[in-house]
């Protein structure tokens, strides 16, 4: 019975990751080399006994995809950001950085990312109205009824894809276009101001995500998680993937943490994802699913799951002038990127202390 529960938890994690993998395809990332990230994650968790798994994460895919003008810039952002994160984890600096930055700025940054996700979802739906509208409606209704993101993803993606197939004109279907050469392909990295900003944005986002999601998985599994080790595993996975044209994968909240054997359920989940990607099943699925089918999930994730709680922590739970710091971080993140948003929060906090505002 325990083995069956482990298997179901692993399959649930796969189901949660696939639609977000389609989002990665929409931004031009190749699926086959992304399998390297899941292999690294499975090996890393096997060796360290970590219960926190890595998978496709809409937030980092959206940040990298939105900030990079082309696939080379996006891959460069992911690789260099992962390299910085690996060094942070290797020197045990992750929790020290978070302690120095403080919860107000961190929550403000995450709230801003929620707004970014909502904007991307709206643009996707606007560009492909029929499946986008269906995805929005079914995603909202499903989440309100179940409060479960797995059901939200499944129902909104499936129904919007079916409706698009039967009702949309050929020009409106706009299915995901898989990477032209979906194979291990070495693309030369570039370094420019936008790539540097993007890499730092990925670092800022992942610092918060590693600690938040790592601790959540730890509490679910009732086991300790070393956040710095987790950061190193995630970073090595990103570097392995992006080096050959694959997309970003990060720490996620996974059903495998609640399995009877959380470590091996997580390893199984990542192994299954690696096989799906290596055998090119994800692009085949993407051929029949409109890009806008993920819009409802992104909207729910941004506007309902990510924004309210983090905005409340940044604005309502802060004291005195700290609300200004939280608000500035949130707004600047939403209109620029997580790095600029977090930097603006640090600067405003310094000015407040300097002038005694």
Image: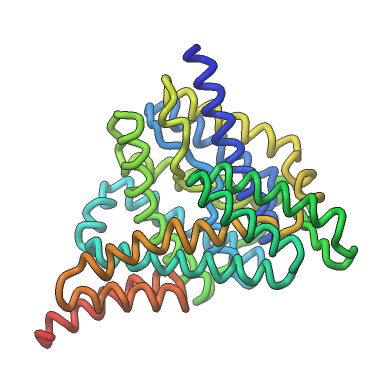
Give residue 297's quadrant in the image.
Answer: bottom right
Which residue does the image show at 56% across and 47% down from the upper left? 56
Depicted 229 relative to depicted 11: above or below: below
Find residue 124 and report its horizontal and vertical position in percent.
67, 67
Name the image colouring: rainbow
Is residue 217 visible from the viewing direction of this image?
Answer: yes
Q: Identify which residue, 122 or 253, lies in the foreground.
A: 122
In the image, residue 323 above or below residue 176: below
Q: Position of residue 187 (x, y in %)?
A: 67, 58
- Residue at image coords 20%, 68%: 318
Where residue 279 appears, as percent x and y from the top left, is: 75, 35
Q: Please tell me which residue is depicted at 74% across the width and 68% down the height of the picture.
A: 129
Name above or below for residue 209 compared with residue 313: above
Q: Is residue 276 left or right of residue 221?
A: right
Q: In front: 107, or 84?
A: 107
Can residue 186 be seen in the rendering of this structure? no
Q: Quadrant of residue 137?
A: bottom right
Nearer to the camera, 180 or 3: 3
């Amino acid at each position: 019975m325990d083995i069956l529960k482990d298997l179901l938890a692993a399959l649930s994690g796969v189901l949660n990751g696939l639609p977000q993998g389609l989002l990665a395809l929409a931004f031009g990332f190749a699926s086959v080399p992304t399998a390297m990230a899941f292999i690294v994650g499975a090996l890393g968790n096997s060796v360290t006994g970590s219960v926190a798994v890595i998978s496709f994460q809409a937030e980092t895919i959206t940040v990298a995809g939105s900030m990079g003008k082309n696939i080379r810039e996006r891959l460069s952002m992911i690789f260099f950001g992962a390299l910085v994160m690996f060094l942070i984890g290797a020197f045990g600096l992750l929790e020290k950085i978070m302690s120095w930055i403080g919860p107000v700025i961190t929550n403000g940054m995450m709230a801003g990312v929620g707004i970014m996700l909502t904007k991307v979802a709206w643009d996707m739906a606007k560009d492909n109205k029929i499946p986008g509208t269906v995805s929005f409606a079914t995603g909202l209704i499903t989440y309100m009824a179940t409060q479960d993101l797995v059901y939200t993803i499944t129902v909104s993606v499936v129904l919007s894809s079916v409706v698009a197939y039967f009702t949309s004109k050929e020009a409106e279907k706009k299915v995901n276009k898989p990477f032209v050469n979906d194979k291990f392909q070495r693309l030369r990295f570039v370094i420019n101001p936008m790539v540097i900003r993007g890499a730092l944005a990925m670092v800022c986002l992942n610092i918060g995500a590693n600690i938040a999601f790592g601790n959540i998985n730890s509490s679910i599994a009732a086991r300790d998680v070393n956040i710095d080790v987790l950061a190193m595993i995630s970073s090595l996975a990103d570097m392995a993937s992006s080096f050959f044209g694959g997309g970003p994968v990060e720490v996620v909240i996974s059903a495998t943490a609640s399995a009877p054997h959380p470590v091996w359920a997580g390893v199984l989940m990542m192994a299954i994802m690696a096989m799906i990607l290596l055998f090119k099943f994800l692009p085949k699925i993407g051929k029949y699913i409109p890009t806008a089918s993920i819009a409802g999930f992104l909207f729910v994730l941004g506007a309902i799951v990510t924004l309210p709680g983090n905005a409340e922590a940044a604005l309502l739970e802060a004291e005195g002038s700290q609300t200004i710091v939280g608000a500035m971080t949130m707004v600047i993140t939403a209109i620029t990127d997580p790095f600029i948003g977090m930097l603006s929060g640090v600067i405003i906090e310094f000015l407040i202390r300097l002038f005694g505002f």
